[in-house]
Image (cartoon, rainbow, N blue to C red):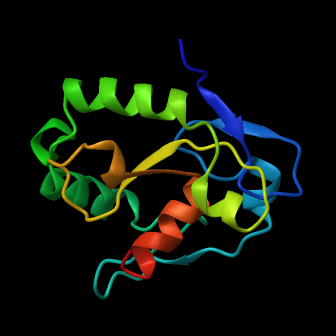
Amino acid sequence: MPSTRKACANRTCPNVVERGVMYCESCAATRPKRACKYKMCPELVEYGQQYCKVHRAEQEKKRGLAAERGYGRAWQKSRAAFLARHPLCEECEKAGRVTPSHHVHHRNRDTGNNRTENLAALCAECHIRLHRIGG
């Protein structure tokens, strides 16, 4: 059974956090709050969050369930098998770092194409960076 805990995203921090959380409490506390991403919302949100509680629920409803987005049971099994075969982040390896991979990225962004050559094992930080630059 996969672990429900992982390393804090701050590479100098030895703490572990629950899956789905990027930073431990001590690292997150040092990050400044920022405005909710929803247009004209004045609420401040904790680091790592994009929306306030009100708008987060609205955005999750719009986004749909994982299975509706192409990430159903078959994908979960394929993902787990791929990560077992590729335990390290590909991007970090290229940069000479050793970081465990927890994300599987579709290189061509086609979630229906789960062939091995279309998948990349990444850490959370590299996965976010790839999506920001359009990769």
Q: Nearer the viewer, residue 110 or 46?
A: 110
Left or right side of 128 for 41:
left
In the rendered view, would you say 42 is above or below 94?
below
**In the image, farthest residue toward the front:** 117
Image location of residue 95, percent across then percent down? 73, 68
**In the image, farthest residue toward the bottom:** 40
Can residue 48 be spotted in the picture? no
Image location of residue 123, percent across then percent down? 59, 52
**In the image, farthest residue toward the top:** 1
Q: Residue at x 76, y 37 (%)?
A: 16
Tell me where residue 43 sits by quadrant: bottom left
Image location of residue 79, percent across then percent down? 37, 33
Tell me where residue 52 sits by quadrant: bottom left
In the rendered view, would you say 21 is above or below 56?
above
**In the image, farthest residue toward the left:** 68
Disc count in the image?
Answer: 0
In the rendered view, would you say 78 is above or below 118?
above
Q: Residue at x 34, y 81 (%)?
A: 41
Left or right side of 46 for 9:
right
Q: Quadrant location of the C terminus? A: bottom left
Image location of residue 21, percent across then percent down? 58, 46
Q: Nearer the viewer, residue 94 or 80?
A: 94
Left or right side of 15 for 17:
left
Can residue 74 be spotted in the picture? yes
Q: Nearer the viewer, residue 43 or 98?
A: 98
In the rendered view, would you say 81 is above or below 60?
above
